[in-house]
Image: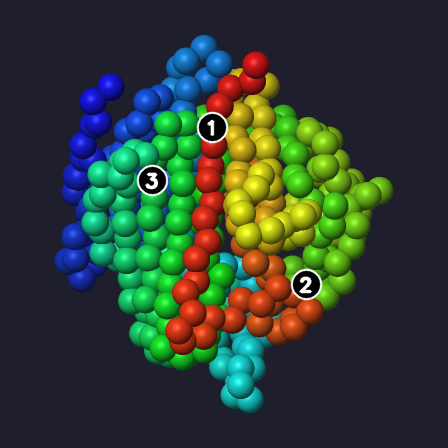
């Protein structure tokens, strides 16, 4: 099969007039569209068990949707720090760094103008494994309160049956970094209803317990005997309303799961199945954790693709990551990046159908 070139089309303009482009990648049965705004995966079409394709990502048809204040990070790269940092501050080498408090008293997903709200420099690549798009951004020293000039690069490669995401970064001062993609999945197709009938398996026997504001308490608890036990394939809706303090704090699932047996090589952390469509998703990562978020804060006020509304739990996130609030938790795996070091991590989203 001849390789199909990457198609580039205008996606809109920012209020200051800067253009934003859309890039379409095709490989076999998969088609992905990516935006230079926020390094966002705008859509991902995958076939169901009958071979019929559907877009499995929540999002918007135009750039204006992604610019609106209510956009809950659909499909974007979040950083410098994905997830929460308590009190919007951390101390590094004896100096306290103050960050934006954009989630109550806490810092979330890089702040008021994180990586999801900047235009990245795109470079299409015809890689041997499939079409790829490199997106680069330079985050200045002091941006959103973080120290160091950070050069960051994300490469999306559309493989046969999978989307691979490779992250890389360097810094000229010690800083904290925790990058992830914030895609909302619905394997029955975006806008098709809730994800409560999806079944999920997580390679995690422990999770980081949270307190108010969904900040980790520092306690790493076993999932055994709790509604957070997804070590075997389980329907998401079966226990989501259980009388459990952790679920009540989050309004459902919004927890970091500690992945079992993590080594330097990528391994499967999650498997998601929709029996209705037959679609499956396997998430493979190098990261030590994955945040399972069940779309609890979606409330039906957003109009997404085709004008469809996204009610509560219309999509779910599986954010591969280091743990929340790691800069303030020395007992957690470190997110510290120093000059001369190279941040490098990968996540693969592998699509298939039930046999």
Closer to viewer: mark 3 or mark 2: 3
Residue topped by disc 1? 351
Picture coordinates of residue 222 (x, y %)? 79, 50
Q: Residues within 10 Å of mark 2 (few under 14, many from 20)?
A: many
**Which numbered dot is residue 216?**
2
Checking the image for residue 213, the label placed there is none
Instruction: Report the quarter where the N terminus lies.
Output: top left
Q: Nearer the viewer, residue 57 or 286?
A: 286
Residue in the image at 46% along x and 18% along y: 48
The residue to which callout 3 is attached is 157
Quarter-of-image position of residue 190 = top left
Q: Secondary structure at mark 1?
A: strand
Q: Quadrant of residue 116?
A: bottom left
Residue projecting furthest to the bottom:
94
Q: CA distance from mark 3 to mark 2?
A: 33 Å
Q: CA distance from mark 3 to mark 1?
A: 14 Å
Q: Quadrant of the C terminus?
A: top right
What is the distance, in whole Å, between disc 2 and disc 1 at their CAs? 32 Å
């Amino acid at each position: 099969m001849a390789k199909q070139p990457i198609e580039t089309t205008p996606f809109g303009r920012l209020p200051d007039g800067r253009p934003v482009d859309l890039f379409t990648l095709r490989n076999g049965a998969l088609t992905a569209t990516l935006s230079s705004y926020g390094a966002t995966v705008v859509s991902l079409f995958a076939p169901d068990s009958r071979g019929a394709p559907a877009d499995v990502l929540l999002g918007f048809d135009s750039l204006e949707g992604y610019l609106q204040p209510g956009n809950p990070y659909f499909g974007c790269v979040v950083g410098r720090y994905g997830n929460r940092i308590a009190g919007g501050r951390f101390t590094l080498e004896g100096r306290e760094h103050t960050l934006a408090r954009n989630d109550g008293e806490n810092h979330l997903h890089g702040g008021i103008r994180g990586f999801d709200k900047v235009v990245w420099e795109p470079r299409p690549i015809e890689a041997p494994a499939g079409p790829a798009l490199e997106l680069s951004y330079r985050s200045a020293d002091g941006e959103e309160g973080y120290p160091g000039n950070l050069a960051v690069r994300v490469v999306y490669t559309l493989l046969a049956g999978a989307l691979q995401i490779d992250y890389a970064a360097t810094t000229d001062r010690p800083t904290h970094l925790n990058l992830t993609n914030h895609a909302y999945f619905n394997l029955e197709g975006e806008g098709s209803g809730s994800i409560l009938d999806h079944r999920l398996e997580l390679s995690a026997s422990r999770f980081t317990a949270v307190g108010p504001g969904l900040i980790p308490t520092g306690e790493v608890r076993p999932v055994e005997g709790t509604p957070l036990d997804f070590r075997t394939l389980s329907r998401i809706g079966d226990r989501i309303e259980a009388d459990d303090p952790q679920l009540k704090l989050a309004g459902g699932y919004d927890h970091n799961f500690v992945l079992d047996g993590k080594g330097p090589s990528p391994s499967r952390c999650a498997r998601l199945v929709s029996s209705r469509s037959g679609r499956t998703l396997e998430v493979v990562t190098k990261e030590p954790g994955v945040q399972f978020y069940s779309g609890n804060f979606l409330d039906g006020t957003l109009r997404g693709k085709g004008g469809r509304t996204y009610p509560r739990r219309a999509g779910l996130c599986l954010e591969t990551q280091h743990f929340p609030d790691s800069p303030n938790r020395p007992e957690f795996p470190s997110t510290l990046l120093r000059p001369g070091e190279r941040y490098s991590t990968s996540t693969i989203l592998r699509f298939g159908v039930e046999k």
